[in-house]
Amino acid sequence: LGYTIRPTSKWEMSLDLTHTATRLGTNNIPFISRASSDTVAEWTNIVTLNDRNRVTAGALFDRIRGTETFEPMPSPPISAGVRNAGGFYAQFEHRFTEQLNAVAGVQANKIGHLDLNAVPRAGLVWTPGGGLSVKALFGKAYRAPSINELYLNYPTLRGNPNLLPERIKTWDFSVAYLANRFHASATVFNSRQTDIIRGNTELDPVVVIYVNAAQTHNSG
């Protein structure tokens, strides 16, 4: 469900509401049944300040509910939870010239019991003409643990309510050329991910428990 209005000639505002419900059942391994729902409400504003500057800002609310049962023992459920999340985002776009544009933004989220977290992003795009374009981008992001990763109590797989969110920091620089029948590009990137969530058997060799136990660093 969505609704868009223009309070002024330079201000566009939209309201969106989505609801998704899913069900899963299986008579084979791992013998689980799952029911979940996700409701998202978002308010977005786009304000064109002038021919060089534009601001986008908004807020959203997300409510996730889910249960999972182990069919051989359907009661109590092996995973159940409700999580509310709220967020705010803002982005500023500036056009220095017809060929050079910049964007910078931030998004702040409060998800369940986790602390408020803000992540930035920025980019610079240069299109000098002749089919050539140059981009430099930087951003941070994070992924909150799922309800299953927090609360699952399957016979051989357990959740961990003390999990931290996964975090990633990335930058990349690319040059591209586009002609009528030819396209070429080259990219340099660097990405670092920390607090990766994965299964661990150090505490119990029979039961896998979710922990923050890994990090990766990729570049090329």
Image: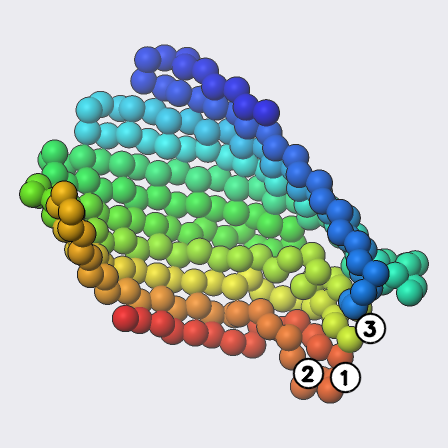
* Proximity of marks 2 and 3: CB atoms separated by less than 8 Å: no
Q: Position of residue 14 (x, y in %)?
A: 48, 23
The answer to whether one can see residue 63 in this image is no
Name the residue carrying label 3.
155
Question: Which residue lies at the image location 52% right of the left edge and 76% below the top edge?
Answer: 214
Outermost residue to the top: 8
Out of 174 and 93, give the one closest to the viewer: 174
- Count neighbours of disc 1 (C-alpha within 10 A) and say few if under 14, some if 14 to 19, many if 20 or more: few
Q: Secondary structure at mark 1?
A: loop
Q: Circle 2 sits on which residue? A: 201
Query: Total label count?
Result: 3
Q: Secondary structure at mark 3?
A: loop
Measured in 3D between alpha carbons, the distance from the residue under mark 3 to the one under mark 1, in whole angstroms, is: 9 Å
Query: Would you say residue 55 is visible in this rendering?
Result: yes
Given residues 146 and 28, the one toward you in this image is 28
| CB within 8 Å, label 1 to label 2 | yes
Residue topped by disc 1: 206
Q: Quadrant of the C terminus?
A: bottom left
Position of residue 146 in the picture relative to residue 180 (left or right) = right
Is 109 drawn above or below residue 190 in the view shown? above
Q: Amino acid at mark 1?
A: Val
Q: Does residue 150 appear to the left or right of 127 in the view shown? A: right
Q: Tag 2's secondary structure?
A: loop
- Whole-angstrom CA distance, mark 2 to mark 3, is 13 Å
Q: At label 2, which amino acid type do we have? A: Thr
Q: Is residue 95 above or below residue 135?
A: above
